[in-house]
């Protein structure tokens, strides 16, 4: 099917988009058309409540206890397991493990205090 670059053609394609209903789950200002594929993309609306919970309850109130009570201590393992599944490494779990690298902040601090 040849694409005709007209507004009607674009709206016809939009009407067939199976993911169109997901647009309402993201913060996108009215009139914004966002086409950059090399970024985090629009923020999911649900992330704001999650960030607020993390900042106010887990960090501000929980302080260092949150490493254990909320599971911060195990986040690299949890993320590694999710990445392994996504990468197909789960089938080779006895031979391989996936571990996310330290953050840029951690690396800079390590270099600074060597």
Image (cartoon, rainbow, N blue to C red):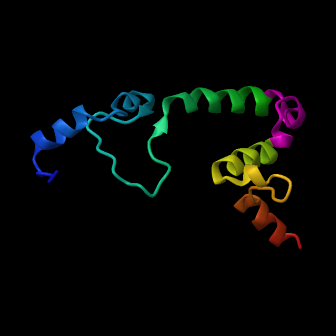
Can you give x and y, in whole percent of width and height, for residue 85 in the image? 69, 47
Residue at 17% x, 42% y: name it.
Answer: 10
Residue 70 in the magenta stretch? The answer is yes
Q: Quadrant of residue 100?
A: bottom right
Is 41 situated above or below 20?
A: below
Residue 24 in the magenta stretch? The answer is no
- In the image, taking residue 80 as reference, residue 3 lies left or right, namely left
Is 102 situated above or below 27?
A: below
Residue at 39% x, 27% y: name it.
Answer: 24
Quick one: 95 or 51, which is closer to the camera? 95
- In the image, taking residue 5 as reference, residue 92 lies left or right, namely right
Can you give x and y, in whole percent of width and height, for residue 27 in the image? 42, 33
Is 35 situated above or below 30?
A: below
Q: Quadrant of residue 114?
A: bottom right
Q: Which segment did they paint magenta?
A: 61-74
Is 114 situated above or below 26?
A: below
Can you give x and y, in whole percent of width and height, for residue 29 in the image? 34, 35
């Amino acid at each position: 099917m040849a694409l005709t670059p007209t507004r009607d053609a674009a709206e016809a394609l939009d009407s067939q988009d199976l993911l169109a209903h997901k647009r309402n789950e993201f913060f996108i200002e009215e009139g914004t058309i966002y086409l950059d594929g090399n970024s985090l993309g629009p923020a999911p609306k649900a992330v704001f409540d999650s960030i607020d919970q993390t900042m106010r309850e887990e960090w501000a109130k929980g302080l260092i206890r949150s490493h254990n009570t909320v599971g911060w201590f195990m986040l690299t393992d949890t993320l590694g397991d999710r990445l392994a599944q996504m990468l197909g490494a789960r089938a080779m779990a006895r031979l391989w493990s996936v571990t996310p690298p330290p953050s840029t902040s951690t690396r800079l601090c390590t270099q600074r205090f060597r």
